[in-house]
Amino acid sequence: MASIQFLGAAGTVTGSKFLIQHEGKRILLDCGLFQGTKELRLRNWAPLPVDPRTIDLVVLTHAHVDHIGGLPRLVKAGYSGDVLCTSGTRDLAGLLLPDSAHLQEEEARYANKEKYSKHSPALPLYTVEDAAKALKLLSSFSFDRTKEVLPGVTARFVRAGHILGSAIVIFELASTGQRLVFTGDLGRYGAPILRDPEGVDLATWLVAESTYGDREHGPEAPMDALAECVNAAVKKGGLVVIPAFAIGRTQELLYHLSNLENAKRIPELNVWVDSPMACDATPIYLAHAEEHDLDMQALTSRGQGLATARTRFTRSVEESKRLNAEKGPGIIISASGMATGGRILHHLKHRLPNPKNTVLFVGYQSEGTRGRRLLNGEKEVKIHGEMIPVRAEIKSVSGFSAHADWHEMLKWMEGFKSAPKQTLLVHGEPPGLAALKARVEAKGWQAHVPAHLETVELR
């Protein structure tokens, strides 16, 4: 008998964790952090309903914090087995996990210094040392290779097109003949840099993300919306502050800004990438040529990188602080993408009160995050215990999302030769989950939305 227990990303869009049990063995697919509302964040501190020491294997779909950010805490709690992923995920995790730990240590220190935490002392969820221990467990194998990961269980990675290294994971259970397919986060067709999501033809059980299950990205090209926003900000003489994920979104932004600049659609501007992790991730993106699409291959063959003429990669705290003196026009790209932590908070704190500035969101903003609150029109937001007035212009461009919308999800599902026995919908908020469930059922497929901690028996 086999089963999947949904320890995260069930009824919500964060905290991906799926426990697969088969013939006494346990595989944890992804180990993400919850983000967003306080209720969700508190789950990060709660012990797993399964003893980490009894887990036999961890497999990762990709290197975003809501999919791998809980790994150091898992290791701290006793997990010591292998962690399997693609080489791209391994390389990016080497940046993300120490950075995540550092941010949590810094936030705890800042909270203790400013005394705005309810806890005394405030503690980090895990430390840089915990992250280093987790990274030692990572091992990788390539796309499209079938590997026996446990006795009677094989795994295969298929390109998901979401970020570098992102994979659809296919498990084969030899004793029952069942095939479990997990989409992870599915990317978009025609997006720059990476190859399109690759198809899967068969699944007994399909676990599919539903981030945009109720939305479509629309016909407007993100380059057009980006150009319009930048040119409007230039006329006002202000800065464009872009909260962007350090991995994936920042590189895509640089790709588009470079093309717009070369096409003379925006003026040549100072562009600051103020995220040490984004600075390190960009050359990793360039190094993994096996994942590049044709346009990216052509760009690298010409010796070009992911940067505009005046891109500056700022690493040190001193360099970051000096950006406060910049008057604009110009562009600051900084993490985190949902404004939940990191250097972007300092830039927002400094730039939000000025109506000349523009804050541009280029990715999904989970319920409860500062990004969602700003998009919802709140007139002030709390940053580092201080209420900051919002006078800057707040804009968003949805076309930059690295997640497939519902049209693209259905397009990917058309690659199946026959319907899975059941499609289990995760990684979405309730409206998106409900909408995609209805659309999947309209195809004649069986669909179910698991609840948090629900166990589905794979009969």
Image (cartoon, rainbow, N blue to C red):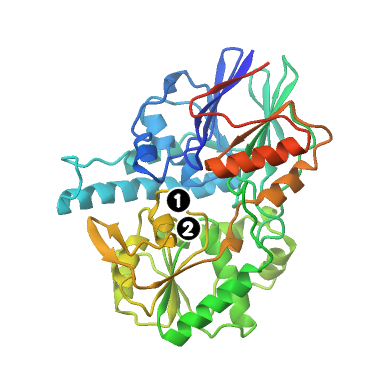
Rendered location of residue 66, percent (x, y): 48, 43
Which residue sits at x=40%, y=63%?
Answer: 377
Rendered location of residue 254, percent (x, y): 55, 69
Answer whether residue 269 is visible to the viewer in this image.
Answer: no
What is the number of the mark on residue 365? none
Rendered location of residue 115, percent (x, y): 15, 50
In this view of the protein, which residue sits in the foreground, 217 or 2? 217
Q: Secondary structure at mark 2?
A: loop
Q: Residue flagged by tag 1: what amino acid is it?
A: Leu
Q: Left or right: 432 with respect to 205?
A: left
2 vs 1, front mark: 2
The quadrant holding residue 313 is: bottom left
Which residue sits at x=61%, y=62%?
Answer: 399
Answer whether residue 307 is visible to the viewer in this image.
Answer: yes
Rendered location of residue 362, percent (x, y): 52, 62
Quarter of the figure with the C terminus = top right
Image height check: is 343 above or below 152? below
Image height check: is 327 above or below 5? below
Q: In the rendered image, which residue does mark 2 sit on?
A: 246
* Crowding at mark 2 (Cα within 10 Å: few <14, some 14-19, many 20+): many
